[in-house]
Image: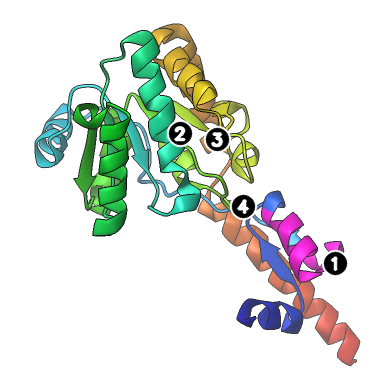
Amino acid sequence: ETVLKQVRLSEHVISVSECTKADVMKYLGVADGNITVIPQGVDKKYHVITDEAAFSVIRKKYRLPDKFFLYLGGFSYHKNLFAMLDGYALMNERHNNRIPLIIAGRTDPFFFSELSVYARKRGVKDKVMFTGFIDENDLPLLYNLAHVFIFPSLYEGFGLPVLEAMACGCPVACSFSSSLPEIGGDGAVYFSPQDPFDISDKLWKLTSDESFREEVRKKGLLQACKFSWKKTTEKTIKVYETVGEKNITANI
């Protein structure tokens, strides 16, 4: 209700993606001409790192294995982590995968317990590791170390972790849902978020085919270069100026 009231009082709406714009038009009744899409940027600290000493420190700090799949991006049911575990478990069953899955970040005890129980049910409890809280300054190093970044979310207004991983040179496998294909472009591998077999196939492709994995990594780096906070700022200022000019003209 509060959001609806704010939107109705607004002269103009800025949306972070075409997907979000479509939702604002559909559910909040905002006209097409009153919305401008301005994507978010990716911070410059997210880049390719080659500092082995720093990597060694992070590995010890979070007890990371030499090679791992990584999930990072919050804990709630729309993040679709149980389907991710299904896909990961299937890959292990079908291909004898030995690469662990790291689930990074702090979650509440209840959700952590649910995930742990489900991982045990799927037979991957010994291959799924929970890091707990990750210092923000450590995130670029974590992305750089990951073998593949997995983002199985059912809905994202933008999906910033996908861009962060790409900017760090980490191949991305994510859901073909909401804004993610729009943000990831051709720099990610997409799977159906509710199809564990598809998740399994895409993860295994990135794991077993090194030339394909490298191709995805390079395309991801190029895709991430399209987004910057400088561009976001410039486009936002332009919208403010345009809306301001219209109001001045209307009052003359």
Position of residue 161 relative to residue 60, above or below, is: below
**Which residue is denoted by mark 3 in the rendering?**
193
Looking at the picture, how far across and down is residue 201, in whole percent? 49, 17
Left or right? Give the position of 117 relative to 57: right
Is label 2 in contact with label 3 (beta carbons under 8 Å)?
A: no
Q: Residues within 10 Å of mark 2 (few under 14, many from 20)?
A: many
Q: Position of residue 184 (x, y in %)?
A: 58, 35
The magenta-colored residue range is 20-35
Q: Which mark is residue 226?
A: none
CA distance separating discs 4 and 2 = 16 Å
Looking at the rendered structure, the secondary structure element under dot 3 is: loop
In-image side of 137 versus 206 (left or right): left
Circle 2 SS class: helix
According to the picture, the residue beneath numbered tag 1 turns out to be 31
Choose mark 1 or mark 3, whichever is in front: 3
Q: Sequence-wise, which precedes: disc 2 or disc 3? A: 2
Residue flagged by tag 1: what amino acid is it? Ala
Give the foreground label among 2 and 3: 3
The residue singled out by tag 4 in the image is: 39
| Image quarter of the N terminus | bottom right
Circle 2 is placed at which residue position? 166
Horizontal side of 191 relative to 209 (left or right) equals right
CB of mark 3 within 8 Å of CB of mark 4?
Answer: no
Which amino acid type corresponds to the residue marked 3 in the rendered image?
A: Pro
**Count of numbered circles in the view:** 4
